Amino acid sequence: MADLLSLQQRAAQGEKLAILTGYDASFAAQLEAAGVDAILVGDSLGMVVQGQRSTLPVTLAEMAYHTAAVARGAANTLIIADLPFGSYQANPAQALQSASTLMAAGAHCVKLEGGAIMAETVAFLSARGIPVCGHLGLLPQSVNSLGGYKVQAKTDAAAQQLIADAHSLTHAGAAMIVLEAIPATLAKQVTDSIAIPTIGIGAGVDCNGQVLVLYDMLGINPGKPPRFAHNFMEGAGSVAAAITAYVTAVKKSTFPTEKHSFHSA
Ligand code: KIV
């Protein structure tokens, strides 16, 4: 199984990392067979599996349930699991307890949302053997503060803040950082200035890797798909072929294209 260190080394050598979300054993097995570099058990499951309006209602017990299912389906793939809303923000000790639940369920790394404010927690978990993936830009757990699912960091001040946040997370020991819905030029600037991989979703082609919500890239999300998503089922013929097409497109940098990317104000 590819571990986090080898993923970081491959990214440093210029290989693009192809990651998708997964929530159950059957899809996890398909993702593993197609050779994804990691499976993200995202709290997006609240929206695409449970039909919630946001990720906020997802509980730690539900995340552990889905993480265990994915771990059973893809025993040889790196698994990143989202810490859900309210399970880590209070203090590092709360985060350690929640992260331990997800690691015991089969995760190899946990993801949390937020910049400098989460640095102490990232350092606390990393020092205790729990790899942490950061998440900057559009933070779905903060949708009520952001006023909707909008492109972030479009002004110069907001871009500078995001760069500072990326540096804080890196210095705190984060293993990688997801950059969601930010201008492509800013994502490149962040990627070029930190030593850990950036994983983009709506952040342009210059990130070290890409992630998409599985149901968006299979075209089975009943809502309006985000502009940065592409339906890989079109012309694929099977789920397995669609996932393989995604992995190939990310590795060759043919996805995302300009039409999936955003620009500054
Ligand atoms: O929950 C999720 O699926 C995510 C991705 C959108 C990156 O965090």
Image (cartoon, rainbow, N blue to C red):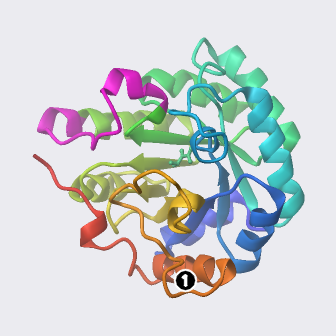
| The residue positioned farthest toward the front in the image shown | 222
Which residue is located at x 48 percent, y 76 percent? 250
Give the amino acid type for the residue marked by disc 1 in the picture. Answer: Ala
Q: Is residue 57 above or below residue 140?
A: above
Image coords of residue 70 (percent x, y): 80, 55
Name the residue: 18% across, 42% down: 154
Q: Tell me, yes or no, whether the highlighted magenta stretch contains residue 145.
A: yes
Q: Position of residue 48 (x, y in %)?
A: 59, 47
Report helix, strand or loop for mark 1: helix
Q: Residue furthest top?
A: 90
Residue 151 lies within the magenta run:
yes
Image quarter of residue 33: bottom right
Is residue 129 visible in the rendered image? The answer is no
Q: Would you place residue 16 above or below residue 212 in this image? A: below
Disc 1 CB within 8 Å of nearest ligand 1 atom: no
What residue lies at 61% left-to-right and 87% top-to-bottom? 237
Asked if residue 108 lies left or right of residue 168, the reply is right
- Compared with 178, 200 (above or below) is below
**Which of the two residues, 202 or 223, is positioned nearer the viewer here?**
223
Question: Is residue 123 placed above or below 40 in the rendered structure?
Answer: above
Q: What stretch is highlighted in magenta?
A: 141-160
Residue located 79% across and 46% down the image: 67
- Which residue position holds label 1? 245
The quadrant the N terminus occupies is bottom right
Q: Where is residue 114 in the image (x, y as percent from the top left)?
A: 45, 30
Examine the rendering and report whether any part of residue 3 can be seen: yes
Quadrant for residue 74, please give it.
bottom right
Disc 1 packing (10 Å; few <14; some 14–19; many ≥20): some
Residue located farthest toward the left when viewing the structure as drawn: 265
Q: In this view, does 134 lie to the left or right of 126?
A: left
Residue 35 percent coordinates (x, y):
69, 77
